[in-house]
Image: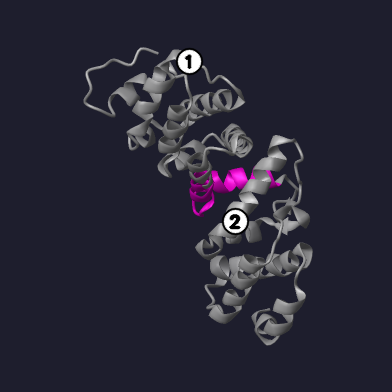
Amino acid sequence: MEQYIILNKTSLICAISDSPALLNLVNLYGLCRSLQNERYQISYSLEAERIIFHLLNEYEWDLGSINIHLESLKWLFQQESISKSLIYQIQKISRNNLIGNEVHNVYGDGRQRSLTYWFAKLISEGDNYAATLLVNLLTQLAEKEEQENDVISILNLMNTIVSIFPTASNNLSMNGIGSVIHRLVSGFSNSSLGTSFRTLLLLVFNILTSVQPAVLMIDESWYAVSIKVRPSRLILHQHCHVIKELTESSLSCSC
């Protein structure tokens, strides 16, 4: 496989311009690399990897365009070198999830499941960059402040992820979702009760009902979030003592 990629480097770069052709190659390469890492610990060609990364970074592709093996999907989200391209894929996943256009194209566990389902599982497992990239994407959107639809789609995707795998809350929190939520909450006025704000409050509720208290205490921004959204009464009573301990403030958390 690697020899084929190296020997045909020029023709591959010139010929592969459509997403299905590129992803069929990447699917096979990612599967081989994953099996090498898990079973055989065989060394791999840095040159072949560089070519694959170049193709993924330079050409437009869509994870939902072909059937992809679960191990290949996981390998992709373990590659920091293609972070920008993966963030673009996450945006596509979030938009499809928002409109209910689920793509059931991931196989490898005996049944085909949706791309959203396996993306959620990657975040819950934590041995990849999925959670980091998702939080980074929401951070970027929060900084731009004008892409409300994209913010809603990402918040909705996070709610879906936590609903499927509640343990995903731990990795989202450890990657700084609390700070991003605080920034978003702070950007809403008291009268901002639109879709974005309701979806954001739902995410706060879902995370705090599933995150481990020890994880919650690591990020002090959750205390600030609780102060901001206290009027909504969506902060669970069982987590009030955890949030309170995040600071030395004498204020009590009365949810």
Q: Quadrant of residue 7?
A: bottom right
- In the rendered image, residue 83, in percent from the top left (x then y), is placed at 54, 59
Residue 183 - label: none
From the image, tell me which residue sits under label 2: 86
42 left or right, relative to 242: right
Magenta-drawn stretch contains 129: yes
Q: Name the residue at 69% across, 36% down.
A: 98
Residue 232 - label: 1
- Looking at the image, tell me whether mark 1 or mark 2 is earlier in sequence order: 2
Q: Amino acid at mark 2?
A: Leu
Q: State if disc 2 and disc 1 touch (CB < 8 Å).
A: no
- In the rendered image, residue 80, in percent from the top left (x then y), is placed at 50, 62
Q: Nearer the viewer, residue 126 or 111?
A: 126
Magenta-drawn stretch contains 164: no
On screen, residue 233 above or below 43: above
* Viewport quadrant of the C terminus: top left
On screen, residue 39 above or below 65: below
* Viewport quadrant of the N terminus: bottom right
Q: Name the residue at 48% across, 25% down.
A: 188
